[in-house]
Amino acid sequence: MLQHRWRQWVHVTKLDPAREHQPGLIEEIATSGTDALMLSGTLGVTRQNMGELLKQVAGYDLPVVIEPASPEVAAFDGRLLLFVPSVLNARDVGWVVGKHVEWVKGQTVHWERVVPEAYIVLNPESSVASVTKADCTLGPREVAAYTRCAERYFRFPIVYIEYSGTYGDPAMVRAAREAIEEAQLFYGGGINSAERAAEMANLADTIVVGNAVYESGAEVLRETVRAVQ
């Protein structure tokens, strides 16, 4: 089942529905060797542009995941995996659980397709940190504690260290790695070279590459794939 195979992914490419995607770029990404496509964004994502991007990526033999930033965007049918984030270090509690309650109240949820993610946001300059009012002053000890709490208390299957737009501190990812036991450790942020991909892949189970696709093109994406597979 697809909802279990995601644990085998080592490289995921994140596409932002609010950005423009030329058909040629989509094809290059889909044939790069990446394990899956994650459709996700913090600002400007609507049901309409998410639907348009879904049409563009349809037809490729590649798993597609929606990572919704709002209940509206989570309203697609039950054929797709939903990776639903809770930002555990958000000062705005709505991003820990409130948005999720709105989502569940508003529609039928295909729970067999839902994979919860425990986000730990660590780049204070990122849009996600601004929107969620995340406490990005954490050190390795706090990151480890959040990781243990996410995995052992809340039972999240994914812990996601998110630097969104900048390359993170490997010491923070290592702290999460050493704290984790069974959950899948994701890392995202600033991976724009084979060297960075390899460094973070040595610490995390799955790396997520996003901005590099838009800033440097598909060849850089292929370099990051080769570095981890």
Image (tube, rainbow, N blue to C red):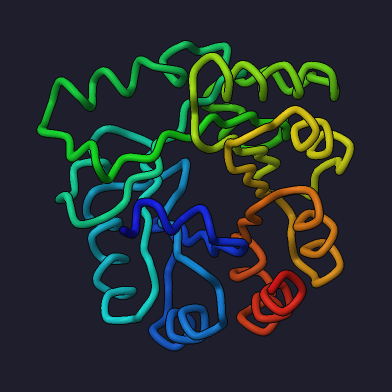
- In the image: residue 72, left or right of residue 186: left
112 is higher (above) or lower (below) than 66: above
Q: Residue at x 31, y 40 (%)?
A: 114
Quarter in which the N terminus is drawn: bottom left
Image location (x, y in percent) of residue 149: 61, 16
Q: Residue at x 80, y 72 (%)?
A: 194
In front here: 204 or 120? 204
Q: Residue at x 17, y 50 (%)?
A: 78
1 is higher (above) or lower (below) than 90: below
Quarter in which the C terminus is drawn: bottom right
52 is higher (above) or lower (below) than 172: below
- In the image: residue 178, left or right of residue 71: right
Image location (x, y in percent) of residue 147: 67, 25
Image location (x, y in percent) of residue 54: 28, 65
Q: Residue at x 77, y 74 (%)?
A: 227
In front here: 140 or 69? 140
Instruction: Residue 43: name its quadrant.
Output: top left
- In the image: residue 125, left or right of residue 43: right
Instruction: Residue 116: name its quadrant.
Output: top left
Instruction: Residue 160: name its quadrant.
Output: top right
Image location (x, y in percent) of residue 123: 72, 35
Tally of marks: 0
226 is higher (above) or lower (below) than 148: below
In front here: 99 or 205? 205
